Image (cartoon, rainbow, N blue to C red):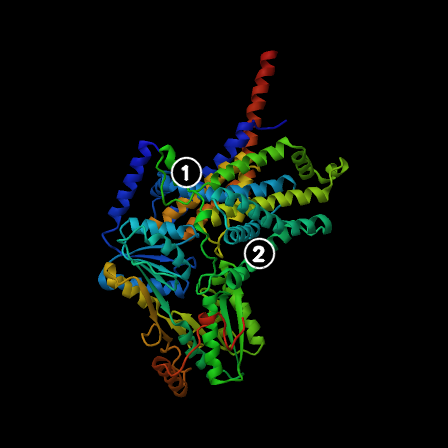
Amino acid sequence: MTLMQKFLGASAALALSAGAAAADPALIFDLGGKFDKSFNEAAFNGAQRWAEETGGSFLEIELQSEAQREQALRRFAEAGANPVITTGFAFADPVNAVAGDYPDTKFVNIDGWMPEVPANVQLIGFQEHQGSYLVGMMAAMASETGTVGFIGGMDIPLIRHFGCGFAQGVKAVNPDATVIANMTGTTPSAWNDPVKGSELTKAQISQGADVIYAAAGGTGVGVLQTAADEGILSIGVDSNQNYLHSGKVLTSMLKRVDVAVYDSMTAGADIETGGFTILGLAEDGVGYALDEHNADLVSAEMKEAVDTARQQIIDGDLEVVAYYTDDSCPVLDF
Amino acid sequence: MDVMPKWAEVVLVPLISLILAAILSALVILAIGEDPVAAVKLMVSGALGSTYGWGYTLYYATNFMFTGLAVAVAFHAGLFNIGGEGQAMLGGLGVALVCLFIPWPHWTLAVLGATVGAAAFGALWAAIPAYLQAKRGSHIVITTIMFNFIAAAVLNYMLVNILRPAGSMDPATARFPEAVHLPSLHEMLAPIGINFSKSAPANVSLVLAIIACFVVWLLIWRTSLGLEIRSYGKSGRAARYAGIGSVRITMIAMLISGGLAGMMAINNVMGEAERLVLNAVEGAGFIGIAVALMGRSHPFGVFLAAILFGFLYQGGAELALWTSIPRELIVVIQALVILFTGALDNMVRMPLERIFLAIRQSREAKATKAAE
């Protein structure tokens, strides 16, 4: 390495650390991209809200490749960002690998799992099956044909987890109901393929489905669109997607990634780390969306049933089986 | 007789293509209100200005060398293998199985085992389309691209249902054992006093890739098999007439091609991630096509083109990190380079040929005048 290169490297590092004021938080979006109208966008909205309320600024990056996971973590940690927040389970392993090298930086990962959590890492998980259970109940009550659909992004455990909670909710209301489950694809484009989402929706409609729940990132946009066009109901996911087709979207299963990001940024460098935070119905980490766009679709009876179930789950009187517990679902085969 | 001198063919055409792509990219960056000069500076300093940048550039380049060579070998046999993506995915599966289930004592042995595993799985994935092409005439472009999707589905099934550690949500294998850790450039260069960046993922596979470039050159231009492959690629009928079996050459060329694509997994799966993830290849198989086109299917050209694309990847990552240029535009810039160097080759070549022709004609005219 020549002296010149050393200087260049050093000056670049200086420029970087000068650019980021001390302890700005950083947010790293997973490969799906920032504006997926769903998971990553929820994270972005939380960060945006924090920035607007506090006047602070945050660093962010949308990834393009797997090798950039560790790269982005290291660059942000070296630039002094704190905490470094990552979205998506795929970050768990890189965070685990990198955290030890930056003991003064706090890392937050949403959706991830680690066998042992390092002292400067906090994992935030959501009880998606509980929220999905509630929207499953609503789907069964709104359905006239007794057939409802589930469209997932990729056939991975997390999405089976969503589908399994949904199917349990459906069966709780109508044990004879049929749940059709489809996955969009096996390549990363499965998370952002509205056309395929639309085709699957049509296929499920032809099999009699009249309420369809999409847990497929950007692909869900096509599901909601086609459902609205064909005059059936759909259910959005992660963010509140009711507004996308007012009066045509029954509800949205909320996964408050925005709240998790907002809270992490508010806590800043003092964020508590070294464990798991599990956000469920009790913490309002998951839930269903009710606003002016779906007020006419959700009857008082429906709302009462769902709210009762919600309270029962919180009190522990009603257990929704998580797919993870033994990697299988009691009511739905994948 | 060639219209253009060799140096113009090899250096001038790609260079002008690159400059055109750069100008267009600059216009695109201007159009979104960013400063193109600053962007280029950031790309160059980010990708080549430090050993950290070089580490990433060379890491990407290693991937592209393997997939570029894979496409190039098939090109020489007149076959268009666009299944590098799927072959590299299966190669990853081979590497993962070898690393996870065989207790290796040392990485030097492990890398040999992994090379065999990666090449065998990649070659296997290329063998079926090759057989269909050779025996049934099913077009290799169609079958190889379809096999990419099948490979993705196979990998998905293996990772979600079989190889995933219990409790993990991530569809990926467990981490490979410490013993199969490949030395990074940092670890390789430290003993000779070069302090290479610790965080960069470039590793000993780079050396393997360079050896592969050399071996492919030997194979194509210095062996009789290479001669047969090239003859078959130039004219299948003439080659058959000369006694070169089309089934044999198609199978051999595609097996080599698939094996090379699979060997990419040594770099990204064993060297970088040290576990197999669902999205391990992420388009390197397709970039290989552009690399082979730009490198004129010559191993040295592939080597250079791979480094160029490594630069574009790493430079693009730096842009995404430190500017507000959206990543879609970075893809646009990468695509412009592919477009100009690969697809619009003749746009540069034909005017250049005309210029060289004019120069030569005027020279010849002068020479005849002087003779008179």
Q: Give the residue drawn at x 25%, y 55%.
A: A24
Give the SS element for disc 1. helix
Residue that protrudes farthest toward the bottom in the picture: A301
Q: Residue at x 56, y 48 (%)?
A: B117
Instruction: Decide if residue B123 is on the left or right side of residue A318.
Output: right
Q: Residue A53 is drawn in which quadrant?
A: bottom left
Question: Please, which residue is most extreme toward the top here?
Answer: B372
Q: Residues within 10 Å of mark 1 (few under 14, many from 20)?
A: some
Q: Amino acid at mark 1?
A: Met
Helix, strand or loop at mark 2:
helix
The percent position of residue B209, horizontal first and vertical second, equals: 51, 39
Q: Amino acid at mark 2?
A: Ala
Question: How far, Cα to Cα, is label 2 from label 1?
Answer: 34 Å
Chain label for disc 1: B
Q: Is residue B258 above or below residue B346?
A: below
- For the C terminus of chain B, the image quarter is top right
Numbered mark located on residue B188 in the image: 1
Q: Of tags 2 and 1, which is closer to the observer?
A: 1
Q: Residues within 10 Å of mark 2 (few under 14, many from 20)?
A: many
Q: Quadrant of the N terminus of chain B?
A: top right
Q: Which residue is mark 2?
A: B151
